[in-house]
Amino acid sequence: MTEYGDTTNESRLTNVSRRQFLRRGLAAGAIAGGALALGEGMASRALAATTGPKRKIIWVTHSIGEWNLAVDTGFMDFCDQAGWTYQKLGVPGAAFSAEDNVNQIKLAIQAKPDIIVGTITDPAVEAPLVEAEKGGILVLLNNSSNEEIRAAHNWGFVGAGGFGQGQLVGRRLAPLLIEKGKKNGVIGFGNAEPGHAVLRDRKEGTIAALNEVAQKQGAKFTVEEFADQSHDIAASIPIYSTFLRSKGDSLLAIVGSGYSSMVASYRAVEGAGLKPGSIPVTGFDTGPDINEGIEKGYIIYSVEQELYNQGYLPSAIAWSRLERLNIPPVVNTGTAVVDKDNLKFFADRTKIILDRSKELGIRHA
């Protein structure tokens, strides 16, 4: 598993930041326009007018893991541009507890940031987020949300709707199976975090779409959920291997609840010596390992959720709220489907993010 370094802006790039670049560019423009005497002072005032004061943003995530990389990069890119600082707090994905999540939000409040971006996978985090807001901290949500709680406070949200993502998976998977003559059997749903609201919504959306197609085509699919422990890929692969053997010929496909689940499931299918596509794997998220699985043919497609945008856009929305008094919107980032036909585009994008994360010092390999 790749490890990340410090994700605070105190460990910064050594090259010229965008903020410095803009300052120099504005100064050069002032000189070119005949304002040589104003120079750097004019540039500084112009820059302050467009970026506002320095701010601190803290992301408190329910799950620190591999999938954070693109989100961190998005946060840090915006902070470079605006002259802000970024910090991440959270709970290791394999050790989630609502109590720990609440405590991390309280720690964030003590740091007195201008903005806290939180994730909601358990209603217990509502109270500390409200506390933060009452203390004058702008609260926004990303990645995971509870719509009832979000709407009650009119908090902005940037992320994917789990149910809609599940529908995208089911509406593609059911016709593919039926076309192959597989109209009855089991579809496994490996869940990295049972009880996680968004992962539950993904499962329910998948089931709804499978049933929608099956009823029209005279098919019957049964979805069986199991805890796959995929935050530890090495421990998860044997769980998938056991599931494969136990279901035998009745197993039609596997849906992974997220990044780690898809990686573990496809590697288990590959390790069992099965032909690519014989037990199609699908699910949610993209990244290097999932791209590899698509390229090999074990993963037939994946529903993307634009993780970079889940870092960059909340930052930009916070700036818009604080500097221009705009109401934070709800942004759905979960509508793209990645398969072999468009894989190059997403692989190229992944490389850009990986290269940038190395420059930022948050990825070491």
Image (cartoon, grey):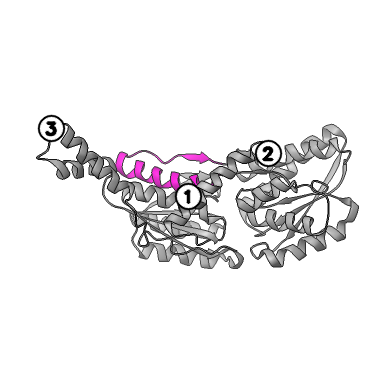
Task: Determine crowd level at label 3: few under 14, some 14-19, many 20+ residues with C-alpha closer than 10 A.
Answer: few
Q: Earlier in the sequence, mark 1 or mark 2?
A: 1
Q: Position of residue 155 (x, y in %)?
A: 45, 46
Q: Position of residue 227 (x, y in %)?
A: 72, 61
Q: Earlier in the sequence, mark 1 or mark 3?
A: 3
Q: Secondary structure at mark 1?
A: strand
What count of labels does the image hold?
3
Is 177 situated left or right of 333 in this image?
right
- Name the amino acid type tagged 1: Leu
Give the residue displayed 49% in from the left and 56% down from the top. Answer: 126
- Name the amino acid type tagged 2: Leu
Give the residue displayed 77% in from the left and 60% down from the top. Answer: 240
- Name the amino acid type tagged 3: Gly
Q: Position of residue 79 (x, y in %)?
A: 36, 50
Q: Which residues are magenta?
A: 306-333
Is 165 situated left or right of 171 in this image?
left
Residue matched to label 2: 168
Q: Earlier in the sequence, mark 3 or mark 2?
A: 3
Residue matched to label 3: 34
